[in-house]
Image (cartoon, rainbow, N blue to C red):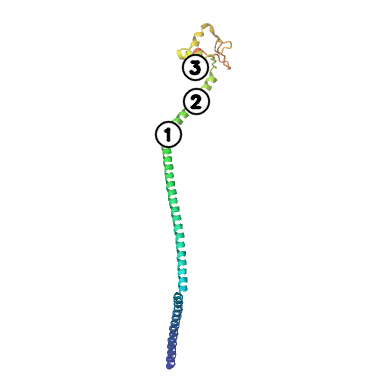
Amino acid sequence: MPDMMRKIQSLEDASTHIQFQVAVTKTAFKTHQKNEELHTALKGALDENATPQGSRIKYIQIEEKRNQMYTQLTEGNKITNELKDYVRALHTEKAFLQLEKTHQFISHERKAHGNRLRAPLVERNLNNLRRGVHWTKFIAEEVKHFEKYTYVLDIGSGAFGRSLQRSSRNPLDDQITKKEWASNDDGTGIQVQHPGWTRCPNGAGTLGGEALHEATSILI
């Protein structure tokens, strides 16, 4: 049994050695084949260059390749210059946009500063308008109150108003005499018999001189 195992191991070793030799032989064969192909190519090139016609053909081929390379180089330079011009245009446009944005920012800042400066004046004007509206409402309410509880004044020529500016004394008081005062028929008050005055619709009597002067002072 041990002898059999040794023979099997010997055969396996021999098989491995043979496989290695086969691999080395194949590698050598491929290398030799490549060398033969290279040798054939070199021989063909030498044969072409050996004749004037072959040399001329080779020169023409070299010139064509050179022209192709020159054309490609020229096209590449052209494209490069176009790209450079485009980049410069982009930089110029970028600078212009930045300058425009800067001007817009400065303009907005100036407007904002002006608005901040005008804000107090606008606030004062609004307050004045509010006070004006308030006083207008107040005067309107006072006029309504005055018209509700007093008589309506009918002064056409305006002489009464001009005389009030010259003197604080009521000029209509001079026109009221003791003879013009009399007891009212219905007993509700005192009636002044003057053509410029009218009777209140509620029958409360006519307006006296002092009351008329006080009402006129409130209106003025």
What numbered label is drawn on residue 118?
1
Residue, disc 2:
136
**Is 121 rendered above or below residue 160?**
below
Q: Nearer the viewer, mark 3 or mark 1?
A: 1
Report if residue 160 is visible in the image: yes
The N terminus lies in quadrant: bottom left
Q: Disc 3 marks which amino acid?
A: Thr
Hey, what amino acid is under mark 1? Arg
Q: Earlier in the sequence, mark 3 or mark 1?
A: 1
Alpha carbon of mark 3 to alpha carbon of mark 1: how far?
Answer: 41 Å
Q: Amino acid at mark 2?
A: Thr
Which of the two labelled residues, at mark 1 and mark 2, occupies the earlier sequence position? 1
Mark 1 vs mark 2: in front: 1
- Above or below for 57 versus 129: below
What secondary structure is marked by label 3? Answer: helix
Q: Which mark is residue 80?
A: none
Per the rendering, the mark at residue 216 is: 3
| Residue 209 pos. (x, y %) | 50, 12
Q: Residue furthest top?
A: 179
Question: Up-down: is 80 above or below 144?
Answer: below
